[in-house]
Amino acid sequence: MANHRLLRGVRWWRKLTKREWAVFSAALATVILTLSFVSHSHYHSGRYASLPANDGVPFTPLSNAHKKSAFCLDGSVPGYHFQQGFGSGSDNWLLHIEGGGWCNSIESCSSRATAALGSSKMMEHEVLFSGIMSREPSQNPDFFNWNKVKIRYCDGASFAGHPESELKNGTKLFFRGQLIWEALMDEFLSIGLSKAKKAFLTGCSAGGLAALIHCDNFREILPKNTDVKCLADASFFLNEKDVAGNPTMENFYHDVVNLQGVAKSLNKECVSRTDPYKCFFPQEFINNIKTPVFLVNPSYDFWQIRHILVPERSDPHGSWQKCALNINYCNSSQLEVLQGFRNSMLSTLGEFQKNAEGGMFINSCFIHCQTWITDTWHSPNSPKINSQTIAESVGDWYFNRKPVKYIDVPFPGNPTCYNMDLTSRP
Ligand SMILES: *[C@@H]1O[C@H](CO)[C@@H](O)[C@H](O)[C@H]1NC(C)=O
Ligand SMILES: *[C@@H]1O[C@H](CO)[C@@H](O)[C@H](O)[C@H]1NC(C)=O
């Protein structure tokens, strides 16, 4: 049954990578619908049957958007989905920032402005909360009853763009990522975040990068006695050359940062030390973040393999095509390259690993985001390291129950992995 569900999820991932994340939101609805079967079966059979079902959480447009000049790429009003905490979670807040890549050119930003990742006009009116967002204790043991916010991503630059970089010649694209971040925080502070006892800023992919970029600011806007931590899921994008030897990812980040004037939002220490665009790579500033950070990342992140290690242009004969869609199709020489990528990730994380306040869960699966999906966050068959699910590991770290610096054995050593098969078609 789990496999059947997973297969449906796979189709979703396939679409996502094929169209370069442009259809993220529509596809998101599909996978969440799929996952809702999981929550409903838990609901009907579980011992938490007194809880209401995980109904859709409505979209709330940012009420101060106009006052703060905070707009999506197309000029529409950004927003979020909010679910009130209850019981012992009433004073705690978990924020999760949606991911969905970046745009690096006028063309890619213009096309994004016509889709859910660039325009709230195209977003679903409600989403289901699952995984780290779930309100069912069986699926989300430590955070189920917290106030939760899913922040929608519509600026194309991880909430770090600046209006000074907008084009002045009639091509109207709004670069307001930083202003959206500030307006969101104002709004959340006014509806209860300012009284939070615990606060947890999380995000997946480009949203996790935003969580890292804004982590210390999130700490600063909250009272001193608030317990503040951050988590980035599948956001440790490596600055590695592709298999043809070209710095594809570095060029891409260079263009994103320059197009939207992102440097102003990046870590000051990092920007004073190196080329500002390089500070969009977590490896350049992770050790400068003062607030405790947890990294969830697969060492064979399929987004990274498909976009950093083997982008289409680096593989003109398509010899990597099958391997980049399903790790089981990689031959021994390709696997060696993937192990090299994993080694780079682990050595790049070396210093962070020594950070006493940090936490990590680096599993050896072929997947991308794992925290907001019930099957990968916390379920009987979810990926584990040291017999711990991601939810248990993050909870142990967040509540200081024990140090969590988990690094998996290399592929194919972990039988609990969900390795995505991106080759299956609907
Ligand atoms: C505005 O400038 C950009 C970048 O130079 C260019 O790509 C775009 O076509 C221009 N738009 C108009 C309407 O001239
Ligand atoms: C693996 O596949 C690639 C691409 O098809 C090929 O060039 C290479 O020789 C293969 N290696 C082995 C060990 O089969």
Image: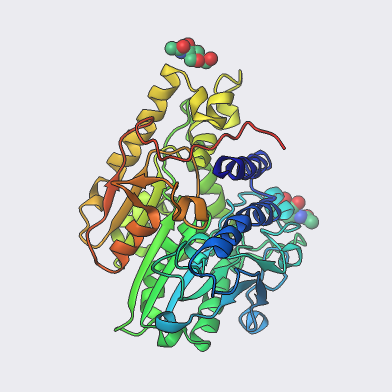
Residue for point 69% across, 34% down: 425
Q: How is the image coloured?
A: rainbow
Q: Nearer the viewer, residue 331 or 243?
A: 331
- For this view, does 85 lie left or right of residue 225? right
Q: Nearer the viewer, residue 179 or 310?
A: 310
Residue 221 image position (x, y, % from top left): 40, 81
Q: In the rendering, at what x and y percent does residue 156 appear?
A: 61, 57
Q: What residue is shown at x 57% (from left), y 66% (from top)?
A: 177
User: Is there any visible trace of residue 266 in the rendered image?
Assistant: no
Determine which quarter of the picture holds residue 28. Answer: bottom right
- Number of numbered tags placed on the structure image: 0
Q: Is residue 106 above or below residue 51?
A: above
Q: Is residue 193 above or below residue 94?
A: below
Question: Which residue is at a point 65% across and 79% down the rendered structure image?
Answer: 65
Q: Is residue 411 visible?
A: yes
Q: Position of residue 26 (x, y in %)?
A: 71, 54
Q: In the picture, residue 421 is in which quadrant?
A: top right
Indicate the quadrant containing the C terminus: top left, top right, bottom left or bottom right. Answer: top right
Spot occupied by residue 50 in the image (x, y as percentages of width and height): 54, 75
User: If the image is split into quadrants, where does the N terminus sit?
Assistant: top right
Whether residue 353 is situated above or below residue 149 in the rendered picture: above
Q: Nearer the viewer, residue 29 or 281?
A: 29
Quarter residue 307 falls in: top right
